[in-house]
Amino acid sequence: MNGRLKAAGGAVGGGLLVAGTTSDAGKSVVTAGICRWLVRQGVRVAPFKAQNMSLNSFVTREGAEIGRAQAMQAAAARVEPTALMNPVLLKPGSDRSSQVVLLGKPVGELSARGYFGGTSQGKAQYAGRREQLLGTVTDCLQELRRTHDAVICEGAGSPAEINLRRTDIVNMGLARAARIPAVVVGDIDRGGVFASFFGTTALLSKEDQALVAGYMVNKFRGDVTLLEPGLEMLRGLTGRQTLGVLPFAHGLGIDEEDGLRVSLRGAVRESVVTPPHGADVLRVAVCAVPLMSNFTDVDALAAEPGVVVRFVDRPEELADADLVVLPGTRGTVRALAWLRERGLADAIARRAAEGRPVLGVCGGFQMLGERIEDEVESKAGVVDGLGLLPVRVRFAAEKTLARPAGEALGEPVEGYEIHHGVAEVTGGDAEFLDGCRAGSVWGTHWHGSLESDGFRRAFLRRVAADAGRAFVPAPDTRFGVLREEQLDRLGDLIEEHADTAALLRLIEEGVPEGLPFVPPGAP
């Protein structure tokens, strides 16, 4: 390693933008993989995503809220996550509006039109908030480049979203401002990857195209030699090489951005459940509530041998569950109404009456309480909760962002908190992670607590006893180790299937000269 990757004395480090032909093309995974591969080469590397839209977020040690994908990419880079790595986070509250989190702190709700800007007969009506943030975004990237040898930036959606290009700060707008090369990732498993690569490039302006240095195929199945003629034709059409063909790999994934479809990845979606350590399996049903957030809380359960995790939306799907989880949500009152409309609220109440385990986390904890007073999130006023925990919740304008640690069930436990709801516990059988337990119903605002191995095993033993299951947690499951193994697998994908020499040149030397223009260009 030489040149800018090993620069010292405050010199600006190298950079690379990982863009994609679509959402979920694999940008998060490729970014994490490049970070892990680089750090194994001795490179000081950091991840970056200028703007993220996600309900899966994380709290840094300084109390800043960022996307969980960036926190996991930081883990891949073996650095502590900071707000610099995700300066703008959008947390959807409806189809039309999102909470804007700037440098780790919420600054208000904004409609899509207010954020992205609007047009009338092709002319801008107002700029929107997003383009005003470009200076903040580039300042954060500059600081990361000053303190690291390399920064790997993740784009959002597609760089060819021509309706949003004028105010773009996360794709080619960022690449132009920072003068860094871009690699475009395409998911071949969806089909049409050659058309996607060509079309993405051809819809960019001449200035943007000059920064697109190559492509990377993701999720390929089969014999790569059959793909090579198409890659050569693509190079002939665009003048750009393909920098890697990454094979389809089961059970891969990091904490990604959003959606139930994404959440059923990795251990939850793809892998076969490991045989139980004891005589029985343990079945966990997670209610797929609207605006579900931080559903990654159950990944640690899915990693346990013999634990079967599934997401459900019908009351009959709770019948054989040993544990029902009400996860976090960006819309507690809306999710509560959904539970009632679906008949899930009654099914959960019956479970509690029968002494069968229920766990509520964050918004799920709030729903299990007696009463919710919300003039902030839904502005619905006072709403009755499920009444299964002696808790009253009042939504505060200021968001709680914290990294608590303590002890529960005789074991050390850590977590993180992201919520507007303030819980007043008025009774119960026992305190539980700043929440409470009443019978077999448990509630807490702490996300991530189940990643603490000793606590998770103790909790599962209690659940198994209450459910009457001969389930025994494996004594040697270490979730942190499993996560590291996943990140190493991502690094292996890059090392074994990407043109690492070409990637290094891009990061170290910047944008290649003479990349041809592919007509017609941006309209």
Image (cartoon, grey):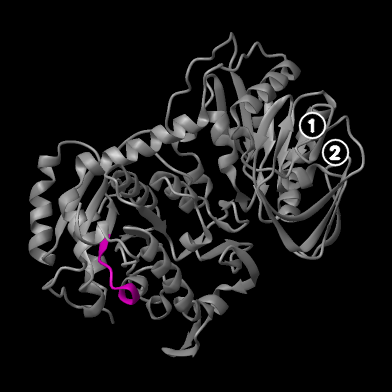
Q: At 78% across and 46% down in the image, what residue appears?
A: 367
Mark 2 — residue?
A: 389
In this view of the protein, can residue 388 be seen by the observer?
yes
Residue at x 58%, y 62% (from the top left corner):
104
Instruction: Please provide percent x and percent y for residue 356.
Output: 76, 24
Q: Position of residue 513 (x, y in %)?
A: 13, 72
Q: Is residue 492 above or below residue 517?
A: above
> Could you tell me if the residues under marks 1 and 2 are in contact, i.e. CB atoms within 8 Å?
yes
Left or right of 224 on screen, residue 484: right
Under tag 1, what secondary structure?
strand
**Helix, strand or loop at mark 2:** loop
For label 1, count other residues whose C-alpha is less than 10 Å away and answer few (under 14), some (14-19) or many (20+). many
Q: In terms of depth relative to the viewer, which is nearer, 292 or 132?
A: 132
Mark 2 is surrounded, within 10 Å at the Cα level, by few (under 14), some (14 to 19) or many (20 or more) other residues, namely many
21 above or below 367?
below
The answer to if 177 sits in the magenta stretch is yes
Residue range of the region highlighted in magenta in the rendering: 176-183
Q: Is residue 198 above or below residue 314?
A: below
Taking the image as drawn, is residue 499 in sight? no
Which residue does the numbered mark 1 point to in the structure image? 441
- Queried whether the magenta region covers residue 227, the answer comes back as no
Q: Nearer the viewer, residue 236 or 191?
A: 236
Q: Residue at x 63, y 22 (%)?
A: 457
Earlier along the polypeptide chain: callout 1 or callout 2?
A: 2
Q: Is residue 264 left or right of residue 311?
A: left
Identified by mark 2, the residue type is Leu
From mark 1 to mark 2, how far is it between C-alphas?
7 Å
Instruction: Give the image location of residue 431, x and y in percent.
Output: 83, 34
| Residue at the farthest right position | 426
- Amino acid type of the residue that numbered disc 1 sits on in the rendered structure: Val
- Which residue appears farthest toward the top when viewing the image? 279
Q: Residue at x 33, y 68 (%)?
A: 159
